[in-house]
């Protein structure tokens, strides 16, 4: 059987299953007792295993098979999910994604998955508990002792030689003890009043964070006798037992000996597991890390409904759109000719063709529109891993994921949003200690929003972190020579914040694998401008920042109002228009040098398009009455003065080319039915 013809189908379906696995695993991490989610994860893993085995991708099949074994135990209530298992499975998904990406790039999809396979098998056999225990190294039998390094060994040996008493002590707390760390601290405090602790296992820091089971062990140097020690330790409430062994030179060598072969084998299992999950987060972090919370706006209709779909090459949709654009221009021309000829049968035929082509236009546009959810759904996992690596607690709240964008824009917007979200976690959200010191919740919140406004889609990333400090940005800008001291004094806050988008700009105090090299925001700005959009930032120091990305809704066909200015025609997107009206010159006010007009019990700015675009043959001062178009962006409105309304029309959006790019308040042009070219006004650029 020739499998190459099925490769594209395998890649598409694999990506869908991997995304489903990531989403369901994040949901399960927030609600570990929900077995129905485990069933969904198991089904996706099982399907992916079958597909990869059929296609001959053995490493993918082997890894998903081991995942199945773990998930099967969970769904049958034989083991319970814990942070350690979660991170092993997350790492498995990372490996699967890497192998699928290798296949996409023309590779064989092979990878060394033996470490993560070993980790998953250790979960099935129960050896992973040994791996976890190796991190906190709780000594179960007094005779085993605890390992010490060369320096600690010499201290103990010299203490014995000097006549001090050296003890190996193992302390166990009651099984139902609530504050284990507090009891351990009381024991340590009592011992330190009588001598010196040389080595504790787990470490003092781990014990303070309750990273131990029920017991801990230590080497202790003192002058007091064994009976006194035992009495002082057992005086601490909720201590179950204290095993104390007096150590001499001979027993010291035995107690601190290297591990036996069995212990060494167990240590190797622990190392394999640690290596397997290390890229996600260390074993130590896993045990106390809290999952990131993801809140997504629910979809209408409740439970998901199966849909019948077919995959279509994007190039075919592009060709269909181009052909329809030409058809639309001819339709407008036919409508104009029919109005001139004035024959009923021709007029009726053209009107029917207009209705049919309008319906066809809606269908063609919808074929290209994709919910931004296809981009947003990759971010919860990214935020989770990033928050853990930075030891922060972050809640990601997603709203408006059903907002639709043109497929061309969707394909390109992912990387800029990744940069902005990583900046929000790394630079925006403070550390837990800093947040608590500032009187904030230890959980930082990042809002990821998408919504329509006029003929644009806005994507906002807002966090409640430290915010941007004007002085710090200006200090770096002056150092890099981006502005002079005189210019800096005149800049508004928004202008200062926009300096962050300069190439090579970075306020990070140290370079890490996350940020600090001065790349990121300049790439974001360039990419978004290439898509015909723009990005801006606003901030309130101490309370957080908001990055707002404006993108064109579609790159093809829009409904617009045609207006005339002198001898020129312009198009204003209908989705931005609130109302058209006529006003008397006496209604125009001049406030601080700006023209304003009363509108609906409020006063809004009045913009003269003829002055703005320097239109010839049009003198608005000669008219006693003028037409206005009220447009809006969000909750802001402005009135545009025009010469004449021509009417509503479907227009094909054409770019002006690279030589005319960046024109203020002009988003493109269109070809009208009579062959004339009309510029398309961007109302969002007129509202500040």
Image: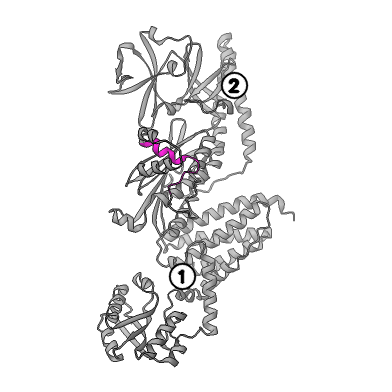
Q: Quadrant of the C terminus?
A: top left
Q: With 459 as the anchor, is 207 left or right in this view?
A: left
Is disc 1 surrounded by few (<14), some (14 to 19) or many (20+) residues within 10 Å? few
Q: Which of labels 1 and 2 is toward the front?
A: 2
502 within the magenta span: yes
Instruction: Find disc 2 in the rendering and name its residue.
Output: 329
Is disc 2 surrounded by few (<14), some (14 to 19) or many (20+) residues within 10 Å? some
- Report whether residue 628 is seen: yes
- Report whether residue 124 is seen: no
Q: Which comes sooner in the sequence, label 1 or label 2?
A: 1
Q: Secondary structure at mark 2?
A: helix
Instruction: Find disc 1 in the rendering and name its residue.
Output: 77
The residue positioned 55% from the left and 59% from the top of the image is 94
Q: Which residues are magenta?
A: 493-507
The percent coordinates of residue 23 (x first, y second) are: 48, 54
Q: Secondary structure at mark 1?
A: loop
Q: Is residue 271 above or below residue 669?
A: below
> In terms of depth relative to the viewer, which is nearer, 266 or 12?
266
The percent coordinates of residue 155 (x first, y second) are: 40, 83
Q: Quadrant of residue 489?
A: top left
Majority SS type along the magenta span: helix
Q: Residue furthest top?
A: 622
The residue positioned 41% from the left and 50% from the top of the image is 427
The percent coordinates of residue 475 (x first, y second) are: 39, 43
Q: With 372 as the anchor, is 174 left or right in this view?
A: left
Q: Is residue 556 above or below residue 200?
A: above
Q: Quadrant of residue 300?
A: top left
> In terms of depth relative to the viewer, which is nearer, 500 or 560?
500
71 within the magenta span: no
Q: Is residue 66 above or below residue 409?
A: below
The percent coordinates of residue 20 (x first, y second) are: 52, 54
């Amino acid at each position: 059987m020739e499998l190459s013809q099925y490769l594209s189908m395998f890649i598409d379906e694999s990506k869908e299953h991997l995304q489903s696995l990531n989403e369901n695993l994040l949901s399960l991490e927030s609600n570990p007792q929900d077995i129905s989610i485990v069933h969904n994860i198991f089904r996706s893993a099982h399907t992916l295993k079958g597909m990869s085995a059929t296609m001959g991708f053995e490493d993918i099949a082997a890894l998903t098979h081991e995942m199945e074994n773990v998930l099967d135990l969970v769904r049958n209530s034989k083991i319970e999910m814990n942070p350690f298992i979660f991170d092993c499975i997350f790492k498995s998904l990372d490996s699967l994604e890497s192998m699928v990406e290798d296949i996409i790039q023309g590779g064989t999809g092979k990878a060394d998955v033996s470490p993560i396979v070993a980790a998953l098998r250790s979960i099935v056999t129960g050896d992973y508990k040994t791996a976890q225990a190796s991190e906190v190294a709780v000594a179960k039998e007094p005779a085993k002792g605890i390992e010490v390094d060369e320096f600690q060994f010499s201290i103990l040996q010299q203490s014995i030689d000097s006549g001090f008493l050296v003890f190996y002590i193992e302390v166990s707390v009651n099984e139902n003890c609530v504050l284990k760390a507090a009891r351990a601290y009381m024991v340590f405090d009592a011992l330190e009043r009588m001598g010196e602790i040389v080595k504790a296992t787990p470490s003092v820091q781990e014990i303070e964070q309750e990273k131990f089971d029920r017991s801990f062990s230590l080497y202790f140097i003192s002058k007091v006798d064994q009976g006194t020690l035992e009495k002082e330790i057992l005086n601490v409430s909720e201590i179950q037992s204290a095993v104390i062994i007096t150590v001499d030179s001979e027993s010291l060598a035995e107690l601190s000996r290297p591990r036996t072969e069995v212990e060494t084998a167990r240590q190797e299992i622990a190392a394999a597991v640690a290596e397997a999950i290390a890229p996600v987060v260390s074993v130590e972090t896993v045990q106390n890390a809290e999952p990131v919370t993801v809140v997504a706006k629910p979809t209408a209709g409740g439970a998901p409904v199966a849909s019948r779909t077919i995959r279509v090459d994007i190039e075919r949709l592009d060709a269909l759109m181009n052909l329809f654009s030409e058809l639309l221009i001819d339709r407008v021309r036919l409508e104009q000719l029919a109005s001139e000829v004035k024959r009923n049968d021709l007029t009726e035929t053209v009107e029917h063709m207009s209705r049919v082509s309008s319906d066809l236009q809606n269908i063609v546009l919808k074929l290209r529109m994709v919910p931004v959810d296809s981009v947003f759904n990759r971010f919860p996992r990214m935020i989770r891993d990033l928050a853990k690596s930075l030891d922060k607690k972050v809640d990601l709240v997603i709203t408006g994921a059903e907002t639709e964008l043109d497929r061309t824009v969707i394909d390109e917007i992912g990387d800029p949003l990744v940069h902005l979200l990583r900046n929000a976690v790394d630079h925006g959200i403070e550390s837990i200690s800093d947040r608590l010191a500032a009187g904030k919740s230890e959980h930082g919140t990042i809002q990821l929003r998408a919504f329509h406004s006029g003929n644009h889609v806005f994507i906002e990333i807002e966090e409640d972190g430290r915010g941007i400090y004007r002085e710090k940005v200006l200090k770096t800008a002056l150092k890099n020579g981006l502005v002079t001291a005189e210019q800096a004094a005149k800049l508004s806050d928004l202008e200062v914040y926009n300096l962050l988008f300069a190439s090579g700009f970075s306020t990070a105090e140290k370079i890490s694998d996350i940020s600090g090299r001065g790349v990121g925001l300049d790439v974001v700005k360039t990419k978004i401008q290439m898509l015909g959009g723009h990005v801006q930032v606003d901030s309130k120091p101490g309370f957080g920042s908001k990055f707002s990305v404006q993108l064109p809704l579609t790159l093809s066909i829009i409904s617009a109002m045609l207006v005339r200015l002198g001898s020129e025609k312009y198009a204003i997107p209908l989705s931005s228009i609130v109302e058209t009206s006529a006003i008397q010159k006496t209604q125009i006010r001049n406030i601080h040098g700006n023209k304003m007009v009363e509108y609906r019990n409020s006063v809004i700015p009045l913009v003269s398009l003829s002055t703005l675009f320097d239109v010839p043959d049009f003198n608005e001062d000669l008219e006693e009455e003028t037409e206005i178009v009220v447009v809006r962006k969000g909750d802001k409105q402005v009135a545009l003065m025009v010469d004449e309304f021509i009417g509503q029309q479907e227009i094909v959006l054409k770019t002006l080319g690279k030589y005319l790019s960046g024109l203020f308040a002009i988003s493109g042009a269109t070809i009208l039915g009579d062959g004339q070219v009309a510029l398309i006004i961007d109302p969002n650029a007129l509202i500040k």
